[in-house]
Image (spheres, rainbow, N blue to C red):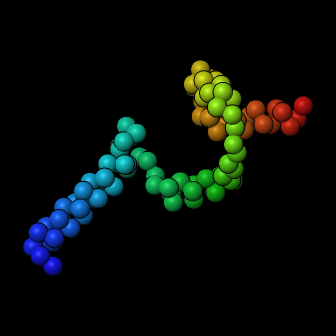
Amino acid sequence: MKKTDLEKNLGLKINGKLKQGASATRFGAASGEVPDRREQRKLDAARGLIPFAVKLEGDLVTQLRTQAETQQRDINELVAELLRRGLAG
């Protein structure tokens, strides 16, 4: 390999590491406060939570997000409560 190729590869490695390091604090939390995805999955599993993906219309999602923001709640909690109400009724 040429010296320029080695320098280019080194630069790509540095850029990759910079991109990975920035993701932990991009949501405004300190790096130690936000668990990574694997840890979050373990925490969710311990609480008995199971990921459940559905496809919804855009206007329905907008309504859910607005309602969650006005009530200052997590959207997961809001959807769970609405599903419980709907299934009970």
User: In front: 19, or 68?
Assistant: 19
Q: Which residue is drawn at 43% across and 47% down?
A: 34
User: In front: 73, or 5?
Assistant: 5
Q: Which residue appears farthest toward the bottom when viewing the image?
A: 1
Say if 22 sits above or below 41 in the image: above
Q: In this view, does 3 lie to the left or right of 33?
A: left
User: In front: 31, or 17?
Assistant: 17
Tell me residue 3's x, y (percent). Answer: 9, 73
Q: Which residue appears farthest toward the left when viewing the image?
A: 3
Q: Which residue is drawn at 18% across and 61% down?
A: 11
Q: In this view, does 30 lie to the left or right of 40?
A: left
Tell me residue 32's x, y (percent). Answer: 37, 50
Say if 29 sits above or below 44 in the image: above
Quadrant of residue 80 within the rendered picture: top right
Q: Is residue 77 left or right of residue 1?
A: right
Residue 72 in sight: yes
Q: Is residue 2 left or right of residue 24?
A: left
Quadrant of residue 26 within the rendered picture: top left
Residue 68 in sight: no
Tell me residue 72's x, y (percent). Answer: 57, 25
Instruction: Name the image quarter holding the N terminus.
Output: bottom left
Q: Residue at x 80, y 37 (%)?
A: 84
Say if 55 sits above or below 73 in the image: below
Number of dots carrying numbers: 0
Tell me residue 24's x, y (percent). Answer: 37, 48
Q: Which residue is drawn at 66% across and 36% down?
A: 77
Q: Which residue appears farthest toward the top when viewing the image?
A: 70
